[in-house]
Amino acid sequence: MNAAIYARKSRKRPGDDSESQSVERQEADARHFIAQRGWALDDAHVYKDDGKSGALFASRAEFQRMMRDAETGAFDAIVFFDLDRFGRNAQKSMEALNVLAEAGVEVYDYSTGIAVDLDSFEGETMTFMKTRFAQQYRDQIRKATKAAMRRKAEMGHATGNRIFGYDNLRIAKGHVELRINEHEAQVIRDIYARAAAGEGARTIAAVLNRKGVAKPRAQQERRDGWSVSTIRAVLKRPLYRGEVVYGRTSKAYGRELRKVHRHTTRERGQIRKPEATWTRCLMPDVEQRLRIIDPDLAARVDAILDDRRERYVASRIRKDGRAPEKAHGKYLLSGGMLLCPTCGGHFEARKYPWKVGAKEGHAGHVYICSTRRRKPGVCPNTLALPIEDTDDTVLSIIEGEVLGTKYIRELLSLVESAPDETEWLVAERDRLQTEVDNLVKSLAAGVPGDAVGPAIREKQSAIAKLEHKLRIPRVTRLDHERLKAALQQRAKEWKRELRAEPQIARMVLRRLVGPIVLHDEAKRPAFVQWEAQPTVGLLDGLAPPNWVASPPGFEPGFQP
């Protein structure tokens, strides 16, 4: 029998020096178990998820590879140490075990030497109980860990990974204190000083990226470095003001996460907790020791941010008191319809362009690269497209290629090829009448009336509907000229709607083509080239079965 091994361990907890359940030890014990039984083992079928939570399934790469191999029949049995290594979510663990059982793969717990039994009531019940206890154990660990972190926070100790601006200094087992890292603290002070002087987050991020300033630890491996969101997070972090706060957010899994983020597909995420549940350190000496930003400077920054936020909200409120329209619903090509040729990001609608745009006469509303605006220094594309002119160009293509004479000819052809359904209606009526006659004969043969009566009434009702349709006068000849004139008038009405209602135009555009790709040029020409691939035809879905297939969508190619 061909066997496989699965080993998993969550990340090592502080103070845990035990190697008894490391993935290496699990693999060695599983190999010994397989050798004792004389089974075959291919090294390609050894799956190890080290440092992976048992609550996660989709993000465990080796676990997913094991499930794919199992469904292809790569092995006959999987060996691991206890069901809690398999997973700590009862529902998902049982689903995965049933998938393996359907694939004909046996599952062995080498700590007991017994195969998992899903074929009997007792075996399936015991298996579910084990997976549920494994989940309960994880939940208890989470509660205990949170309680321990709250006690540490109350004393001003470190409660997690290293934070930019501080070093974690281990004083004793289970006791880690924060110490200010002066080099990084100077960067934080510079950010606050610039914010107090009135510089925006985008400007500050651009300056730091140009200078090559050390990035926050969480972004060390990312090429984009300091971003607007990172600057804003620095300006709002209480710890830089000497306030140790724990529990502002919390990890959530599965249903707990979906209660807050209803439509998320992630297995794990962060959720905000009510301020009343936060834990704070109330020790003045700790606050003094950890403070990087003076209270006066922090107060000036907060005042500027609050004033900026109030003015922004006030400027966005419409005269009728309703919420402002979102940009992705207000403009034709916002919301991902324009792709940047330099970074692949989306163009977005902005009221105030960059200086380069203003110099070229692009004052007012423009489309610009959102990556360049949000992550300064990442995308060098300075192209700013005037919204009015750009939308007019695209709408002209739609009007000429889609709502023009070609579209009207296609509709006329579609109507002309529509079959006369009279023959089908007659055939269907006769078929139902034959079935009714047969049911009546079965009554004469002794079949109980309550058995065939409902079927007879149902078919007679269907026959009546068909006869009603047959009595409707048929159009023997289509007035093509009149229909053509009506379609031309409707096309003109559609053109006006497209001009007046960007939301309608966006739906039509998305129906016809995919995202519009701008073409990268070494030197920007006097015109911008773009290309859009057709998706479906405008007439797709309008023709009933057996009608002539509708034509494909238009192909604009390159347009100036």
Image (cartoon, helix red, strand yellow):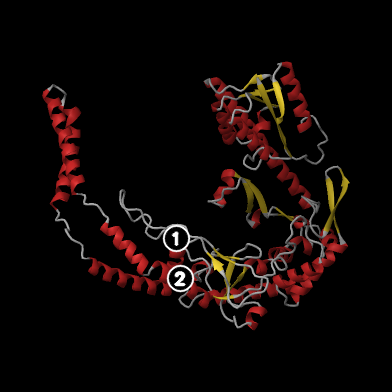
Numbered badge on residue 477 = none
Position of residue 320 in the picture relative to residue 55 (left or right):
left
Q: What x and y, as percent, mark residue 302?
A: 70, 71
Q: What x and y, as percent, mark residue 234?
A: 74, 64
Between residue 349 and residue 19, name the one nearer to us: 349
Q: Secondary structure at mark 1?
A: helix
Q: Is residue 337 visible?
A: yes
Q: Which amino acid, by three-letter code, is at mark 2?
A: Ile
Q: Name the residue: 55% across, 29% down.
A: 98
The CA span between labels 1 and 2 is 14 Å
Which residue does the numbered mark 2 point to in the structure image? 397
Q: What x and y, as percent, mark residue 517?
A: 57, 64
The quarter of the picture where residue 255 lies is top right
Position of residue 398 in the picture relative to residue 369 (left or right):
left
The quarter of the picture where residue 58 lies is top right
How many residues crowd around disc 1 within 10 Å: few (fewer than 14), some, or many (20 or more)? some
Q: Which amino acid, by three-letter code, is at mark 1?
A: Arg
Q: Name the residue: 82% across, 62% down.
A: 214
In this rendering, the answer to whether 84 lies above or below 324 is above
Tag 1 near tag 2, CB within 8 Å: no
Q: Name the residue: 15% across, 25% down.
A: 442
Q: Residue furthest left?
A: 444
Q: What x and y, as percent, mark residue 332?
A: 49, 69
Mark earlier in primary sequence (1, 2) = 2
Between residue 529 and residue 386, name the one nearer to us: 529
User: Could you tell me which quadrant the N terminus lies in?
Assistant: top right
Position of residue 505 in the picture relative to residue 164 (left or right):
left
Which residue does the numbered mark 1 point to in the structure image? 511
Count of numbered tags: 2
In this rendering, the answer to whether 110 lies above or below 132 is above
